[in-house]
Amino acid sequence: MTTDIIVFITCAVLLMIAGTRLASDGDVVADKTGIGGLWIGAVIIALATSLPELVSDVTAGYKGYIDLAVGDILGSGMSNMLILAGIDILFITVYTKRRGLLRNVSGGHVGTASLAIALTAITAIFMLLPKTFGVSSIGFGTIVIAIVYLAGIWQLFRQESSAPDIIPSTKKRSLPYAVLGLGISAVIIFTTAPFMVNAAQRIAEASGLGATFFGTLFMAIVTSFPELVVSITAVRLGAFDLAVGNLFGSNAFNIFVLVFVDIAYRKGALLAEVANVHLITALFLMLMMGVGLASVAARGKKRNALLVPDSIALIVLYALGMYAVYALS
């Protein structure tokens, strides 16, 4: 198992570096092409930072490791909400704002958060059903997810006038250089992810942790590292809406990744065959996003505690969720 651990850590480091550079270059491309603010945070940067999940989980689905893939997708969502708690605390510490980050951002994030919650709820519902129907081996549940995600993104595009007001990129790289960086980062991710997935599956089996828990915790942390770097950087630059939009947008896109995992998995409908313990992860993910959504909806209102209750709730829910998944895996 030692060799597999070394392979996993090596691939994880490469994935972190490539994913971070991918997000950085994606920011430059979005800025220099004049794409609107909503699409920079909630769509473009969210897609860029979620590429590690996309490649890793589609690879896992193709190899039949569906619990590893679904665990990573839902666990990454919980990790993103934990990151949200972290940058909320960072915001208070650096900017001494008693209202907290979530109550100082645009109300446009309500739409993105609502979309992510709705997609997670759909996922949980189709996991509960004993059997799903679809086209060939693609389940009806992932078809519904695809329709809702695309419709939601289109609606967000139509409402772009109320989108977050994101500051322009301060990076000096040219557009061709950024596009080249995107390509190189994508190649690294595509070639590294399969090795990491294989190593992760063998570690999960050898350690007795189980693919579900290993994917929900360890792989989720690794594949969420680009969101962590982008969010911290955005807060330091004062681009608060970019930070929050990226996290909620990544959660929505991560659920959309289930569509591609289902296509890669040729043995049946994905959501009908995964372990029931993923329902626990989905429930805690919805609860965590609900806390974030309520905080954004209550923007402008002050709170009494210096360490914001929103962040405390997110941290507690994450810990409880991981314990429940571990106990039931």
Image (cartoon, rainbow, N blue to C red):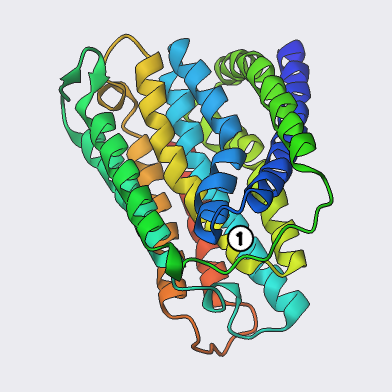
Image quadrant where residue 61 sits: top left
Q: Is residue 18 visible?
A: no
Residue 89: where, in percent of width, then height? 67, 70
Q: Is residue 14 visible?
A: yes
Number of dots carrying numbers:
1
Residue 39: where, in percent of width, then height? 51, 53
Residue under label 1: 242
Q: Residue at x 63, y 68 (%)?
A: 240
On the rendered structure, is 159 left or right of 231?
Answer: left
Q: Secondary structure at mark 1?
A: helix
Image quadrant where residue 231 sits: bottom right
Relative to 274, residue 250 above or below:
below
Relative to 71, residue 66 above or below:
above
Q: State which quarter of the image contains the N terminus.
A: top right
In the image shown, does 274 or 142 lie closer to the viewer? Answer: 142
Relative to 245, residue 150 above or below:
above
Q: Residue at x 73, y 45 (%)?
A: 24
Residue 190: where, in percent of width, then height? 63, 19
Give the crowd class for mark 1: few <14, some 14-19, many >=20 residues within 10 Å.
many
Q: Residue at x 60, y 31 (%)?
A: 52
In the image shown, does 126 or 17 lie closer to the viewer? Answer: 17
Residue 321: where, in percent of width, then height? 46, 49
Q: State which quarter of the image contains the C terminus.
A: top left
Q: Amino acid at mark 1?
A: Leu
Relative to 195, residue 230 above or below:
below
